[in-house]
Amino acid sequence: THYGRLKAITTDSDKSGTLTIELPADFNSKTDTLYLFSEKDDGEKLNILVSEPQRIILNSTLSATPQQLTFATVSEGYADAPAAQTVTITNNGNQTVTVDLPTASNYNITAGDGFSGTQAELAPNAEATFTVQPKLELRVGTHNETLTISGSNSTSATVALEFTVDAATELPVYQISATPDTLTFATVTEGYA
């Protein structure tokens, strides 16, 4: 248990305003709780509680940029997938969040900066990146997915993925015919002129 004074109110103008609280490095949002309350000093070193303690909820939010990836349309039987595109995940909250590398059915996801294996530990305002690329040999059709990036403290962000495989265009078939279909030439002697 820690106890500390944030602001002494000595005039009416002190009764409003904004405070920034920096939590100790060992503060654990899963096991520790933060409460704020008002108390009054009665002049005899006894503090009298004048408001009920209010629990402060720590903010955890993630964002993904961009929020949509559209890949170039390819034809059936494509040998090269469209180029991979990068997604940046940002911790917009006020506490550290652990992010898991997402998975997708029709796309390869590759960890980038900020990831160690399949996880990234993001302090407030920190970023991590990963790339997304359509898989090879997908069938003809639209392969749209919503990619969900999940993090600790019930955080998440989404990215819409769009990719289409068109049916292969059949090449025209040409036929050549000749008339007559055979030619007969006269017999000649060797050395003819």
Image (tube, helix red, strand yellow):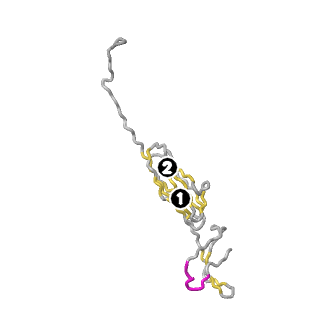
Q: Give coordinates of residue 17: x percent, y percent.
A: 55, 79
User: Does 103 sit above or below residue 171?
Assistant: below
Q: Secondary structure at mark 1?
A: strand
Q: Is residue 44 toward the left or the right of residue 92 in the image?
A: right
Residue extending furthest toward the left: 179
Q: Quadrant of residue 58?
A: bottom right
Disc tally is 2
Q: Residue at x 61, y 83 (%)?
A: 50
- The residue carrying mark 2 is 83
Q: In this rendered view, identify the residue nearer to me: 51 or 39.
A: 39
Give yes or no for contact between labels 2 and 1 (Cβ–Cβ under 8 Å).
Answer: no
- Segment tinted magenta in the rendering: 8-17
How far is disc 2 from disc 1 in space, using C-alphas?
17 Å
Amino acid type for the residue under numbered disc 1:
Thr
User: Callout 1: few (<14), some (14-19), or many (20+) C-alpha neighbours within 10 Å?
Assistant: some
Q: Quadrant of the N terminus?
A: bottom right
Give the dominant element type of the magenta stretch: helix, strand or loop. loop
Q: Position of residue 188 (x, y in %)?
A: 34, 13
Q: Residue 151: x percent and y percent?
A: 58, 61
Task: Judge the density around disc 2: few (<14), some (14-19), many (≥20) Cα neighbours within 10 Å.
Answer: few
